[in-house]
Amino acid sequence: MSKSNLEDTIVAVSTPIGEGGISIVRLSGHKALKIIDAIFVSKEKVRPSKFKTYTVHYGHIADKKSKVTDERSQGKFIDEVILTAMKAPKSYTKEDVVEINCHGGLQATKKVLELVMKHGARIAEPGEFTKRAFLNGRLDLSQAEAVLDIIRAKTETSLKVAMSQLEGELSKKIDGLREDIIDVASQVEASIDFPEEESGVIDKKEIVKKVEDILDELRGLIDTYSEGMIFREGVFAIICGKPNVGKSSLMNLLLKRDRVIVSPIPGTTRDVVEELINLKGIPIRLMDTAGIAEAKDILGREGVNRSKKYLALADIVLLMLDGSTEIDREDMDIMKLVGDKKKLVIINKIDLAKKINAKNIKDLFKDYEVIEISVEKRNNIELLEEAIKNAVWKGDFTQGEGAIVNNVRHRQLLDRSLESMLSVKKSLEEEASPELVAIDLKEAIYELGLIIGRSVSDDILDRIFEQFCIGK
Ligand SMILES: Nc1nc2c(ncn2[C@@H]2O[C@H](COP(=O)(O)OP(=O)(O)OP(=O)(O)O)[C@@H](O)[C@H]2O)c(=O)[nH]1
Ligand SMILES: [Mg+2]
């Protein structure tokens, strides 16, 4: 995004491309209103640059220089629109922003876009509006990143986590920690500047205590990461078992639609099928797999290989057994393959004559929960869903209650600042020179600063904003 220049006025279609009720063309920059003056014909006979901020206006987008004529509007009217003007600095980007609600559909939108460009705007890069909000100081970097999380939120809880980040929950926490470290650094610096006043200036005990408090806070924040990731990326859950136990039937049931083929013939599923489900607010990336067995043909072998590959990646395994048959060698082989991965054991088909139950296989799965269900008769499905939820997340997220880390970049920077602060503590305990302590403190201040976007380099910004959609 190197050509990003705040002097340019940018434009993009902010709604998904295609047919729809309306589509929104959005402009931002110091020429936005001037461009609109040139292309908007208002009913009110007022120039758009004179519109009051946050007002909505009806009119037409017109190519006033067009030579084409027709009886209605001399061929100049391109679309009938509703226009909203939001003037700097109280706008999304802190610049003049205009949003044009066109009739949905490719042609009208494209024409309006072309006309705006003809009058001096350039097409925005992905995420450039949000990048400007950051560069112009309306959002810090972690808040700008939260905008993307909101767009991509998979469940209501994911949305709550992202919203709390946008509202500055994480920023406040990071800012506070950074201030605390700056405070320690200033005391350490004082001892470098005035070494002769040894006793008065620096109270080592007090500093060590402060450093320990900071370490605790950093650790606490890092601990929120695993749940943060659950809501951002979802949990990988894989249904495994020998052929014909009912894996695909369970997939369809949890997904609430007939996504995969179910049949009494063992070896029906040949590939790994992944779908996102919302299980009590938790986004779960549920995978149905080919039954693991000695496959007789190439397709079967490939299916089994894939099942094994995905098994390795899963966060939790739903290991399925058939309750109407004894546990056999195939089941045992799969159990070995799953090893000590986090798992739930599911005995299916309890509507049939039972050969195994949770009690008599308990010894085989000592520490794991065993649930008996029937997909066919819908028995104990609520119980199973509850068990999956509890296995992946026990908490309860309430917006506005503390910061949560849900981003790898933030996690890495927190890890690095934790390391720097551990090194500070060690140096203090070993009575190392204050200069050395000061270096590690500066490092920690710098790393925390990067989370909220202080002194962050252009290429990091590019990497963050290029993940956004165009028009955001
Ligand atoms: N009686 C009974 N039959 C079931 C139940 N669940 C699934 N079945 C039947 O078991 C057969 C196999 O089901 P699938 O869901 O295709 O099994 P699968 O584990 O995906 O099998 P593969 O893809 O071949 O590995 C089908 O005929 C289902 O209707 C159940 O709870 N009770
Ligand atoms: Mg199947």
Image (spheres, rainbow, N blue to C red):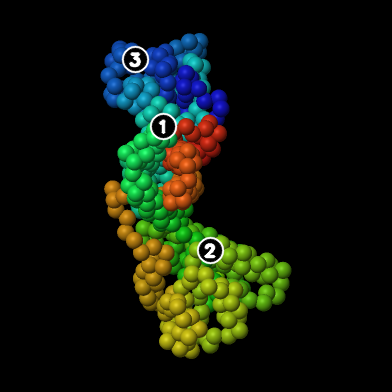
Could you tell me if residue 433 is visible in this image? yes
Labels 3, 2: front one:
2
Residue found at the very far front of the displayed protein: 196
How crowded pointer 2 is (Cα within 10 Å; few <14, some 14-19, many 20+) is rated as many
Asked if the residue under mark 1 is in contact with the one under mark 3, i.e. CB atoms within 8 Å, the reply is no
Residue shown at 36% from the left, 64% from the top: 394
Q: Nearer the viewer, mark 3 or mark 1?
A: 1
Q: Position of residue 274 (x, y in %)?
A: 53, 60
Compare marks 1 and 2 and give the one earlier in the sequence.
1
Rendering quarter of residue 190? top left
Q: Dot 1: few (<14), some (14–19), or many (≥20) neighbours within 10 Å?
A: few
Q: Disc 1 designates what residue?
A: 193
User: Does 396 appear above or below 40?
Assistant: below
Position of the C terminus by quadrant: top left
In the image, 220 versus 149, the foreground residue is 220
Q: Amino acid at mark 3?
A: Ser
Question: Badge 3, how many Cα within 10 Å: few under 14, some, many 20+?
Answer: some
Locate the N terminus and report the quarter of the image it occupies: top right
SS at circle 2: loop
Kindly report which numbered mark, 1 or 2, lies closer to the viewer in this rendering. 1
| Amino acid at the residue labelled 1 | Asp
Q: Nearer the viewer, residue 441 or 31?
A: 441
Residue that mark 2 sits on: 314
User: Pointer 3: what residue?
Assistant: 49
Q: Amino acid at mark 2?
A: Ala
Report the Cα–Cα distance between label 1 and label 2.
55 Å
